[in-house]
Image (tube, rainbow, N blue to C red):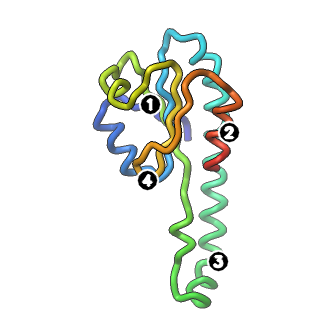
Amino acid sequence: MPVSNITSEDAFDNLLVENRVAVIEFYSSTSGSCRAIAPVFDQYVPFATLRAILQIHYIIGNLCIMIADYGSCSEWEKFHAVSFFRVDAGELPQLSKHRGVTAMPTFQLYVGGDKVDEIKGSNQTALVGLIEAVL
């Protein structure tokens, strides 16, 4: 699953509703810093997808045991997949402004539709820390 490009404000609003955990990169196509850090962002997409598949497999495999032991499926509530998105700030300047983007690139972490963390600039260590915290 590749990084999805957001092309409208409605699509952005929908992604916040449809994805429990989302990491969003606001970028400029003319920024060297954005181009330089893009591979770091991209490298986590396959890992997040694999993690989600393995977690679902584990949950399904243990679902009958959990229901028998506890009478509920609370483990499902803990499951989350991390989704990755990009917004071209030059194409959607109002969205970028509305979301408080003042530097390129800006990475925002949303959980349950709420912004919980943000990194401005191309600090690779900070970006890796942000992503690995939710994987």
Q: CA distance from mark 1 to mark 2?
A: 22 Å
Q: Which residue is mark 1?
A: 5
**If you read the primary sequence from the N terminus, does the residue marked by circle 2 or circle 3 appear first?**
3
Residue shown at 66% from the left, 68% from the top? 58
Q: Amino acid at mark 1?
A: Asn
Q: Residue 129: where, in percent of width, then height?
A: 68, 39
Q: CA distance from mark 2 to mark 3?
A: 30 Å
Q: Label 3: which residue? A: 62
Contact between labelled residues 3 and 2, with CB atoms less than 8 Å apart: no
Q: Amino acid at mark 2?
A: Gly
The x and y percentages for residue 121 are 58, 21
Residue 112, label in figure: 4
Crowd class of label 3 (few under 14; some 14 to 19; many from 20; radius 10 Å):
few
Mark 3 touching mark 1, by CB under 8 A? Answer: no
State left or right for residue 125 relative to residue 38. Answer: right
| CA distance separating discs 4 and 1 | 20 Å
Residue matched to label 2: 129
Q: Earlier in the sequence, mark 1 or mark 2?
A: 1
